[in-house]
Image: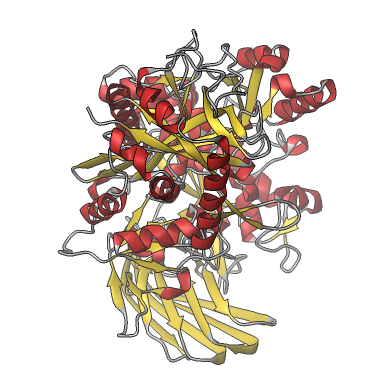
Amino acid sequence: MAFDYTIKYKSENNYENPVHEAYWQFLVTPENNDSQELLSSNFNTSVDARIENSINGYDFETARIHCKKPFEKINFEAEFRLLKKEMNPFEFTPTLDNHLDYDLIESLLFKVEFESFLKETDLTKLTEKNKDIYLFNKDLSIFENLDALNKWVYIQLYFKTGVTDVGTLLDEIIENRHGVCQDFSHLFCAIARRNKIPTRYVSGYLHQGEGFFGDSQMHAWVEAFIPNIGWIGFDPTNNFLVNHNHIKISHGKDYNDCAPLKGVIYSSGKNETKYSVEVSYQQ
Amino acid sequence: MKYNKSNPIFSSYQNNTNLFDEIFDKNENVRPTYKKILELYSDHSIQDFANLNEKAKASFFNQGITFQVYSDKKAQEKIFPFDLFPRIIEAKEWETIEKGVIQRSKALNLFLWDVYHKKNIIKEGIVPMDLISTSGNYLRQMIDFNPPGGIYNHISGTDLIKHSDGKYYVLEDNIRCPSGVSYVICNRNALKRALFGVFNHYEIQTVTDYSENLLEMLESVKPKGVDSPTCVLITPGVYNSAYYEHCYLAKTSGIELVEGRDLFVEKDFVYMKTINGPKRVDVIYRRIDDLFIDPMEFRKDSVLGVPGLFAAYKKGNVTLANAPGTGVADDKAIYTYMPQIIKYYLNEEPILNNVHTYHCSNPDDLKYILENIANLVIKPVDEAGGYGISIGNRLTKEEIEKVKMVIKENPRKYIAQPIMSLSVHATYIDETNSFEQRHVDLRTYTLLGQDKEFVLKGGLTRVALQKGNLIVNSSQGGGSKDTWVLKK
């Protein structure tokens, strides 16, 4: 069974003073992968400029605008149609001997192969006092540990908007125990990597209407690599495994690799950014 | 021929025979290559040299051959002091240097390909993974990307010294944006103007062919499907310390000198704004650091770069020289693995020696370093220009304790090497109005393109102008000499 999704991303930027020239890069286009197929994408903008398709540094698709005429406000809209397969997150064969998996993640070959996603970044850094905040139980399988971590992060933090921003570090998040999906995901990444599991930060959309946290906004979750199984998605903001409600855009080491909007603006003064997301499907 | 106290220009020359003097051997005999020039120079009085020295200085200023020194207070425009006594390198000696620096450049290129693809050298445990994963210069955006022609380090500058054993040692490989090549050519021109007569007595290799080889190299790595590429040189602008060089190289290679704002990207192609409208750009010799080339991908506060440039590069529509991410192999900690790197990729013995290096990140080495700090040079792994270097035997007790603290706090950031005794060369000194021994090194320039290798036959001999000083970088108050490579 497949789900026929329609995703609408809208953003509005207002500038105090006229902007003379500007570049924007939107990283909002769903990727094509085994579970999702992008059928169409449509972009619109209020400014007089062409919208170009390009890529970011990690080869994920972007939409770019280069505006050379003065303006004070820009609207941008993207609409995507996408087919998503129904997924059973538990559809894999667990390893029989856990020790083999734990041996494997200790091997040099494994560490080299997954170096990018084992690395601590500024946003996924556990400082000395928090470095052992959550250690894996080697009697459990890697999957069981990650699943328990998913739940632990969910319980540990309270979902609250407006208290953190994209640059908030984990020390503060752990201390105050609240944040949004980025913060939940960064904490998961940091702890999983600390326990030697390659983990990547994922940016995407969550199907709304069922009361999950993160709908009507961009969402973030994580993918962890489990030996002999592959990349498995965990959504610590909602304490479940990634399923057909999750539509992936891109992944990276942390938020900075996946920022949905980057801009270079030749102007002065303040600006204001608003955006909204609508996700709907027909079965 | 012994040097002679009655020789007017060398009457006060103090020859410290513990050091390797490029002109005089241990028995104070003049080395064969220098006999003629010493004879010729002896026809002049020291006052002639004083006058010529003044003229040369004025000429450098008038031509604007200057660089900027960064300090806490303000930027200062300075000339790179030029010395009238050339350094002479025999054909046979040069042959070894040339083969050696090509070998290193090729090995580094293969190393870069490997660390951005299969990483075999790390998987086999030859180079530790930490050197890659903790390097701020390892750009993960470059993983699995194939740069045009398979070349990363198109332009390398290799720093060599001659130790008291008379052998050349490599101090470091500069493969980010090595500078100084324009001074090589300016020094040659300046010496020709000042003392053209001496050139009649030596058969010297030319250095003025650098720019044509630079252009040929850049054209050789053009993107696929381009017949006659448009190349440009991108500079951070007039406030950069090497701005003179950027202008010089662009002018003499016949390519445009541009700043970020002169270029723009459309549909993943790069264009230059001209009075005749946009012109497509195919190859960019960039003298801007990695993190500043594209605010969309790297530092978003960069006003030096071009938004969208990195995407155009990854789509294969433009070539960047040097490739982004080469800095990972420019790291002084990687330097210490050069003998193994050369062996691994080329199955050859290194032609040029490496200075033995201790890693502060290795506990045994760290112990040795802390105990023997007075006999070592401590260097940060990721700083260029001679900044942050501590020379053990010049430090006071308190300074030593301070350096120890700094190392212990961040061991990955530092390496230590035995204090190498750089060779010395007679150098005209303003203050004493005489020739004195000063320490020198040699920076060579290598170009690597598709089916193209070129080493400039000559190089920048840098002089530490302060007596006894071992740091020769221009930013640390060094000067330079014309460097002659003799024909066979």
- Residue B178 position within the rendered picture, expressed as x and y whole percent measured from the top left: 45, 45
Q: Is residue B351 left or right of residue B326?
A: left
Q: Nearer the viewer, residue B288 or B112?
A: B288
Q: Is residue B392 left or right of residue B23?
A: right
The image shows a total of numbered marks equal to: 0
Q: Nearer the viewer, residue B145 or B173?
A: B173
Determine if residue A94 is in view.
no
Q: Is residue B410 left or right of residue B450?
A: right
Q: Nearer the viewer, residue B195 or A229?
A: B195
Q: Nearer the viewer, residue B338 or B132?
A: B338
Residue at 19 percent of width and 59 percent of height: B224
Residue at 61 percent of width and 82 percent of height: A267
- B448 up-or-down from B374: above or below: below
> If the image is split into quadrants, where does the N terminus of chain B sit?
top left
- Residue A117 position within the rendered picture, expressed as x and y whole percent measured from the top left: 50, 42
Residue at 39 percent of width and 38 percent of height: B459
Determine if residue B448 is in view.
yes
> Picture quarter containing residue B349?
top left
- B67 up-or-down from B350: above or below: below
> If the image is split into quadrants, where does the C terminus of chain B sit?
top left
Q: Residue furthest top?
A: B27
> Picture quarter containing residue B299?
bottom right
Residue at 37 percent of width and 85 percent of height: A50
Q: Is residue B35 left or right of residue A8?
A: left
- Residue A177 position within the rendered picture, expressed as x and y whole percent measured from the top left: 77, 53
Task: State the scheme by which the image is colored.
Answer: secondary structure
- Residue B386 position within the rendered picture, expressed as x and y whole percent measured from the top left: 60, 37
